[in-house]
Every structure is written in structure tokens, then in C-alpha cells.
Amino acid sequence: MDVRAIAIVASRDVSPDGFAGVPTAFLDLLGRSVLQRAVDRLRSFGIDDITVISEYGSVPTIQGVRWVSALGQSAWRLANKAFAEIAQSGAESVLLTHVGPYAEIDYEDLVQFHLDQGSRVTAVIEPDSELTGTFVLNPTRRNDAAYLFRHQLRTSRLPHSYYEFNGYFNPLSTAADLRRLAVDAFCGNAELEPDGIEVKPGVWAAPTARIHKRARVLAPSYIGAHARVRAAAVVTRCSVLEHHAHVDCGTVVDNATLLPNTSIGAGLDVAHSVVGSRRLFHLGRNVEVEIADPKLVGTVSNAPLRLVGHLASLASFLPAQVVRGIVKRGRDGQPISVPEAVQAPSPALKSATDESFSPNLIIARRYGNE
Amino acid sequence: METSRPVVVKHMPERVNVKQARVFLRDVEPLITSDRPQIVFDLSSVKQLDAAGVDMLLQCMSEVMKRDGDLKLAALSPHAAVILELTRTDRLFEIYETTADAVRSFSHFIPAAMRHQPFGLSSSGSSTAGSAQPTGVGPRHGGVPDVAA
């Protein structure tokens, strides 16, 4: 059976897509992006011919998929064009999906349902009859496809059949959804598996993660690639540190997610939050705040920039030390001979003999009640 | 600044960064160095608070405590509340929802935990120790708990 997929990474003009400037499809979920996980899931059901249409400029590399960049154009229009090409190349069914929500759909069962129903369009719905943004079409139904793309996969023309999906679904529309997905993954409610090694029961870490021996990482938690947990830091209660996240000394990360390249300062308490791109979304207060102070929340620059920064600080440190040494030597003048310095009266005694104290002054020390 | 009572209410600026914190500290210095100061900082308009701002608050608190006074925070903006929680300094201050509550708290000796506890006398006023059901911290602080009807 020749089933091909079109995955669309584009914002729907109902709400801002993503969190802290990162589109939802590119947000990391326990080490791998939403898009990567969607592609992996399609492949696990034997759908290898995947076209990804992205309207964002920065696209992470995923091997084996056909990329179509829609930078400056409408991704939905390009999707329509891609659908026409797929239809001409002889595919038997085409699966359309909007990457953003996280859905654990059994694609094999879905395609079988579509064929059994014999309908031209099958829409995947949640138990509460909400569309999930995934459809299966016959390649001959170009008008139906055009209608779907025009409406950004939010509605379809009747008649069509509905495939009720009972698996795990998370809309990933808010930061709270992102946290809920992490907790569900740790609790086994979702099939999502952390991308790393289980270093101890319930604690997953990428091989390149650096955890100080005096840091405490309590299960369940995940430490991503190149993430760093410094001494006396505590990571606990389903907390997730995505790649290149840094937690400084003594900071507690409790039921929180640190997005990639986020650094948290020393001695802080990050709880019930999603932090990234100098923004903190507090789930308890349901408020998003921008934090400009890098001592609290900062971003980790990429490796070449860090190297340049370290070299610059080293280059400025050495001349400063040399200048400081010369200035200090000049200020010290002649070295004091040790015997003279020892025999000279103490400055404290000298001041005591001054006229500032009365000669009649008696200094007594009390021992107990005497 | 409102000085209708011996309690001084001071509104903090929108941005409390290194520079603004220094200016604000200079501004409140006469207040915090007075004898037994009673000060309330209103943080309702704070939209940016960084580590220097938190440090300034702690410095004010320290100075006020040295002089046997008290510094309370009121009407925290969401940003200020998040930053104080992040830096673990929220537990060092008495924080009130409104400035009026904070000002009133100086003239009452009711602990914060007891403020919403029913520790007053019941309507009949005839409570007996045997039949009284202890509610929260009421009896420990000398209050008489409500009697079940």
C-alpha cells in the first residue's frame, strides 16, 4: 500500500504558535522535537515518503524527508501543490497532518478505516469530536484537499467519515500543555520516551549531559544533551532540562521545564514553570514574564561564540594581571626590613599613648563576678 | 507617598534594575534610617525587577530591622511575585494583597495565619472547653473556637 504523508509546519492564525519564540513543531520534548517525533511515528507505521512543508526559516535537519521551505510564502498553498504532485506520482492514499499538537495515532488502523469506509476524506477526531488536524484523502480528491488547505486543516467538506481516536493527544497550545506532556511521559500515560539513557531508575540523561557529583537529580527527571547541572543543584519532580540547558550551583528545579539553551542562575528556585528565551511561564500563577537579568535567567550561546568569549576574556585577563603587577610593585616602593618592622611599636599601642585617652583611665577586665 | 499614619507607603517604580534600584534606595534612605520605621512598599506597578532590585529590597529590610522597624510588601505585580519566588525572597517578607491590608497590619497583632481563622466568640458566647472543637490555631493563640450548633 503506497501511503504518503504531508506534514505542515505553519501557524494557524488563531493564536501565536509556540512558546518563547520557538514554533511548537520545533519545541523539544524530552530530547527530540515535536516534528522529529511526528516523523518517527509515521515511519514506525511504514510511511516513509514524507514531505515536510515549513513556513519557518530555521529548520532542523531530519534525514530522509523531503523539505519544502515556505519562507515568505503560504505553507498551505505549497501543501496544495505538493498534494497535486503526490497524486500524479501514483500514491494510493495521502495523509495530511498539521505538526503542532502531539497525537499518538495508530496510522495503520487509520488508513485501514479509511479504506474500509470507502469515503473520500477521513478526519481524525478526538473523543469530544474536536478535529486533531490529521486527515486521510484519496489522491483523486484534489478539490477536497484544496478546501482543507484553504481552511488550514480546521474543517472539511461533507460528506466525510470520522475516525475517532482514543490514543494520547495533547494540543501543545500552552506552556501548561508542554508540562503536562512531560509529566504524562514520565508517568507512562503517553508513549513518549526520553531520548537518553536511564542512568538510574526514573532518571534519563543524554550521554553528553554533565551532572556534578554533588548535584541531586531525583526521579523522574530528564537531562538533555550537553545540559549541565552544577554542584548542590537539585532537579526533581518530572523536571526536564533540554539540550544545552545550564543549572547553576544551589538552584532547585522542581516540576519545571528548561527549554534548550537556557541558563538558570545560582541559588534560585524554579518551580512549576517553563523557562526559555529569557521568559518564564509560571503555571501556578498562569503568567508569563520576561526576565532581562542574565543572573536569573539567561541564554547559552552556541559553542563557537562561547569559545570566542572565553578567548577574549583570557586575552584581556593576562595584560590586566601584568599591569596590576607593575603598578603594585611601584606602589610598594622599598621593601621593609623584617627586624625593624617587628621591633617598631604597634600602631595600636602608639595611638593608646596619645592624648586622646586620659592618663587617669583604668582598663580592667572582669573575670566571673570579680 | 502616603503618610496619613505613622506607616509610610512607598510606590516602587516600573523598572527596578541596577540604576533604578540605586536611585530608589537613595530616595528611601531617610525613611529606613529613621527610628523604628514602619514602611510598606507597593509593588503594583513593577514590570521589571532584577537581581539588583531584590538585593535593594533585602538591604532595606536589613536596615529597617536594625532599627527595630518593619518593612512589608503589598500589591505585588505578577512579575514581582514571580521574581521574588524565583529568588526565594518571598518568604523573608510579609506580603499583603493590598496596601491598605499592609498598613492595617501594623496596628494589629494578629498573625497572618490567624487572619482568616474563626477565633472570635460564638454568638451565644457560652462556649465550654469540653464541647469546643479546636479549629486551626485558634486555641493556641488564646482565641475561643466556634462551638458547633
Image (cartoon, coloured by chain):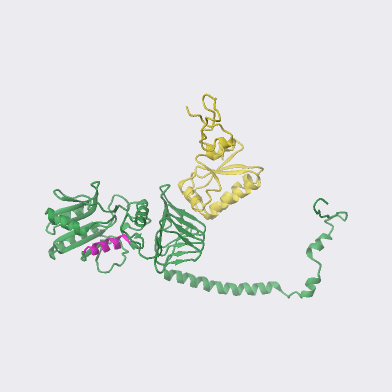
Chain colours: A green, B yellow
Q: Quadrant of residue B142?
A: top right
Residue at (33% x, 63% y) in the render: A32
In the visual, does A214 lie left or right of A24? right
Direction right: furthest residue: A360
Direction front: furthest residue: B130
Q: Check the image and report above or below for B124 versus A76.
A: above
Q: Position of residue A152 (x, y in %)?
A: 23, 53
Q: Which residues are magenta?
A: A33-45
Q: Position of residue A109 (x, y in %)?
A: 19, 57
Q: Position of residue A95 (x, y in %)?
A: 19, 59
Q: How many marks?
A: 0
Q: Position of residue A63 (x, y in %)?
A: 27, 69
Closer to the camera in the image, A181 or B45 = A181
Magenta segment: does it hold A43?
yes
For the question of whether residue B25 can be seen, the reply is yes
Residue at (51% x, 37% y) in the render: B136
Q: Check the image and report above or below for B4 versus A88.
A: above
Direction top: furthest residue: B124
Closer to the camera in the image, A31 or B50 = A31
Q: Main secondary structure of the magenta part?
A: helix
For the question of whether residue A119 can be seen, the reply is no
Magenta segment: does it hold B79?
no
In the visual, does A174 lie left or right of B39? left
Q: Please state, as top left, top right, bottom left or bottom right, where the N terminus of chain A lies in the image.
A: bottom left
Residue at (52% x, 27% y) in the render: B122
Closer to the camera in the image, A51 or A309 = A51
